[in-house]
Image (cartoon, rainbow, N blue to C red):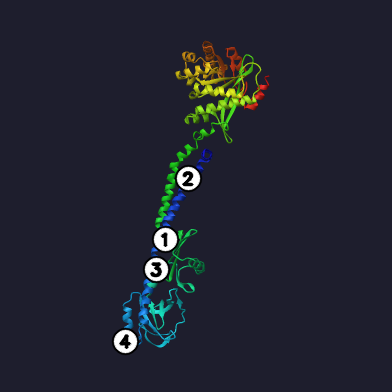
């Protein structure tokens, strides 16, 4: 889980804009999907309601037609006389969806009807009879003249009699869907269609596979097939998102709202993502051996010009990125990981030098370790350092703990004195840049005062800062400490510092910070 967490934070740091706009895009897509689903659901609900209404009408129409046919088929006195036609009209007036009744001879020819009266010549229409699954005989799209208009009529018939369904009823049915199917004994038959004839075979194949109403997604469109058990009609409608968007202002409004929310989301999450991309969020994963890169800068005895120790300088390596102190230290402090970082550096430095650095035949080799003020805790440092030294099996190492001058406080005195009592050296780093006085330095009783490099830089210019070096040397003598000059960049500065009584020095002129392999080679040259 920690590895996944770190990987995610690292990716955010590498591509913050991708995450910001990616989250905005994901939210936009999610909201758009929600808008589409909502719009489709509302549209489907409207279509389904239209289908249900049409199915109920068809059920009523067929039920009314079949009931009337059953009544008429049971009468033996049906005839085309004036009185017989009046009787048929009386039956017709009691219906809602039927407009005409006709009588047929034994060859199924029309011999009279309530609208045409007695025909001089029987009419035999060559229209195929569709027998529905429930056994109803129907003729569809039969051209008739009704109310002075030619219309395609639907007829239900039985031997000797038929009824014509009102075109108004069939119009409501036909406008309810893209395809209206009649369920016959031979399969589905097209009653009416509003789609390209090329689509009919595939739509028919899909509808015939179903046994109940079904909603189906088909790419960027959907298809609704509605049917009722026992009813001989199937309704099928296809709707594309484009059509819905054109006809439904709600979908356009939802899309506009989605884009607005996505823009607001990007603005809201940007500061949060940028904070996540900061080093402080990952620093906890970097304070370990795998990411620590230690450099060793030699410290020279200016009298003999031989190295007597080194200062350990820590960097953090994250993939191909090297984090410098001015970048990583604020992150470590903000994350309150000072103690964890310092302990990791101490353990790795002692172990690394113990493995690679040759044992000294004479004298101790001083290892200077920088510490954050929070890390100066003798109860933790003493066992940590002693265990590390014991594990290294080196008795020629001498550990020096460096504390910066501006961090000096009365709270550190007890811990520093305890460290000194256990044989560890204490150095005050960057001396001269803070506000400590002789009293606080005396209480601390350091072994070394490290002169800040800014004093050394101005040494040849005879400036006010360079003139403070003799004063620092006198303070060191007063507290029984030695001085170490930092930032020596010219050999001429070595002579001047030696003349001022400075005992030790370090800087690019003497030796740059090096990894352990290069440091060992460098130190070997002085043997």
Describe the element under mark 2 as helix, strand or loop.
Answer: helix
**Left or right of 485: which side holds 174?**
left
Measured Cα–Cα span from mark 2 to mark 4:
82 Å
Describe the element under mark 3 as helix, strand or loop.
Answer: helix
Res. 338 visible in picture: yes
The residue where tag 1 is placed is 44
- The numbered mark, 1 or 3, whose residue comes first in the sequence reads 1
Res. 147 visible in picture: no
Which disc, if any, is residue 345? none
Position of residue 122 relative to residue 32, above or below, is below
Q: Nearer the viewer, residue 494 or 325?
A: 325
Describe the element under mark 1 as helix, strand or loop.
Answer: helix
**Mark 2 or 4, closer to the camera:** 4
The residue where tag 3 is placed is 55
- The numbered mark, 2 or 4, whose residue comes first in the sequence reads 2
Q: Position of residue 199 (x, y in %)?
A: 50, 67
Position of residue 171 relative to residue 218, above or below, is below
Q: Nearer the viewer, residue 71 or 182?
A: 71
- The numbered mark, 1 or 2, whose residue comes first in the sequence reads 2
The residue where tag 2 is placed is 23
Q: Quadrant of residue 178?
A: bottom left
Q: Are marks 1 and 3 in contact (CB under 8 Å)?
A: no
């Amino acid at each position: 889980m920690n590895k996944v967490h770190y990987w995610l934070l690292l990716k955010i740091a590498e591509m913050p804009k991708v995450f910001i706009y990616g989250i905005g895009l994901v939210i936009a897509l999610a909201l758009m999907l929600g808008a589409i689903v909502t719009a489709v659901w509302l549209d489907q609900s409207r279509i389904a309601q239209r289908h249900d209404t049409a199915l109920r009408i068809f059920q009523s129409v067929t039920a009314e037609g079949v009931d009337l046919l059953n009544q008429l088929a049971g009468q033996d006195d049906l005839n085309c006389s004036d009185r017989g036609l009046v009787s048929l009209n009386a039956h017709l007036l009691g219906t809602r969806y039927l407009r005409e009744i006709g009588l047929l001879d034994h060859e199924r020819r029309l011999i009279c009807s309530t609208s045409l009266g007695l025909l001089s010549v029987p009419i035999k229409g060559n229209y195929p009879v569709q027998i529905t699954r429930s056994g109803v005989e129907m003729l569809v799209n039969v051209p008739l003249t009704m109310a002075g208009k030619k219309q395609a009529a639907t007829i239900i018939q039985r031997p000797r009699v038929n009824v014509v369904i009102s075109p108004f009823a069939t119009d409501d049915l036909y406008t309810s869907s893209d395809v209206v199917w009649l369920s016959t004994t031979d399969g589905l038959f097209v009653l009416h269609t509003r789609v390209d004839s090329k689509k009919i075979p595939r739509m028919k194949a899909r509808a015939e596979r179903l046994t109940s109403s079904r909603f189906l997604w088909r790419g960027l469109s959907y298809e609704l097939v509605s049917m009722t058990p026992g009813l001989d009609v199937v309704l099928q409608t296809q709707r594309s998102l484009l059509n819905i968007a054109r006809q439904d202002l709600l979908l356009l409004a939802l899309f506009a709202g989605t884009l607005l929310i996505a823009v607001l989301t990007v603005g809201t999450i940007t500061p949060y993502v940028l904070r996540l991309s900061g080093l402080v969020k990952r620093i906890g994963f970097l304070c370990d051996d795998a990411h620590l890169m230690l450099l060793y800068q030699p410290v020279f005895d200016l009298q003999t010009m031989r190295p007597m120790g080194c200062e350990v300088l820590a960097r953090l390596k994250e993939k191909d990125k090297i984090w410098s102190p001015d970048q990583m230290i604020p992150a470590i402090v903000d994350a309150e990981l000072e103690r964890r970082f310092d302990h990791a550096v101490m353990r790795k430095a002692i172990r690394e030098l113990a493995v690679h650095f040759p044992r000294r035949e004479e004298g101790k080799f001083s290892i200077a370790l920088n510490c954050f003020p929070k890390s100066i805790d003798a109860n933790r440092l003493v066992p940590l350092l002693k265990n590390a030294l014991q594990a290294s099996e080196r008795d020629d190492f001498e550990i020096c703990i460096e504390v910066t001058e501006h961090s000096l406080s009365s709270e550190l005195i007890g811990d520093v004195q305890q460290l000194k009592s256990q044989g560890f050296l204490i150095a005050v780093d960057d001396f001269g840049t803070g506000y400590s006085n002789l009293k606080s330095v005396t209480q601390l009783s350091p072994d070394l005062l490290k002169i800040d490099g800014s004093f050394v830089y101005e040494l040849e210019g005879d400036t006010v800062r360079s003139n403070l070096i003799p004063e620092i040397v006198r303070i060191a003598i007063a507290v029984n400490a030695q001085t170490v000059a930092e930032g020596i960049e010219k050999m001429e500065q070595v002579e001047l510092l030696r003349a001022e009584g400075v005992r030790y020095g370090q800087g690019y002129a003497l030796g740059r910070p090096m990894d352990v392999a290069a440091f060992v080679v460098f130190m070997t040259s002085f043997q």
